[in-house]
Image (spheres, rainbow, N blue to C red):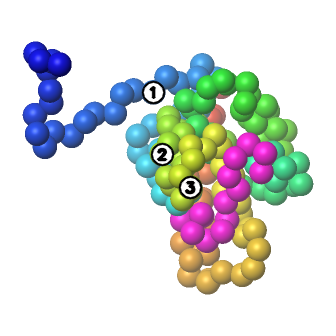
Amino acid sequence: MEGAAQPPAGAVAKKAPTALAPIAKPLAGRKLCKRTLKLVRRASEAKFLKRGVKEVVKSIRRGNKGLCVIAGNISPIDVITHVPILCEEANIPYIYVPSKEDLATAGTTKRPTCCVLVMTKPAKGEINEEVKEKLKSDYDQVVAEVAELTSSMF
């Protein structure tokens, strides 16, 4: 196609804004989103993570505690509408992040992920005490910010 505007060579393509679901509240701001995804990545490396709606729901029903991170650009929205309700019933803090692709990258999977549960205890086995302490401090910081954001909503 001649005459079509081409971006200059070496230009970085900007990501198109994602269509967020109307129920995506509380939505993490840029800073909190970055911290949350970092926590998800660390939790994934330390086997403290449950990925996907099925696994997250099963873990919550079994009584596992943690932080639920939900993607805000899920379509159809019906897939995840029950997850925040389950979290509230189990007193589990939850936060929405704008992109399911970013959530999957942080969770070290190639498939876009609807939601993950960052658990307070490892899925199996024991981990290094130093890694555990670092993960706990990151976890506590993010949960405190999520609680603050949630309380300002109501």
Q: Along the horizontal axis of the image, is 142 left or right of 55? A: left
Which stretch did the figure color magenta?
42-55
| Residue 93 in the image: above or below residue 26 | below
On the question of residue 141 being in view, the answer is no
- Horizontal and vertical percent for residue 101? 50, 42
| Picture residue at 75% right of the left edge, 79% below the top | 125
Q: Amino acid at mark 3?
A: Thr
SS class, disc 3: loop
Q: Could you give the CA–CA distance between mark 3 and mark 1, rounded to whole angstroms?
A: 20 Å
- Horizontal and vertical percent for residue 134? 54, 72
Q: Could you give the CA–CA distance between mark 2 and mark 1, rounded to whole angstroms?
A: 12 Å
Q: Which residue is mark 3?
A: 109
Look at the image and tell me in which quarter the N terminus lies: top left
Res 102 label: 2
Look at the image and tell me in which quarter the C terminus lies: top right
* Quarter of the rendering containing residue 31: top left
SS class, disc 2: helix
Q: Amino acid at mark 1?
A: Thr
Task: Inspect the magenta stretch and tell me whether residue 47 lies in it.
Answer: yes
Taking depth in this image into account, of 52 and 49 the one nearest to the observer is 52
Residue ranking furthest to the right: 62
SS class, disc 1: loop
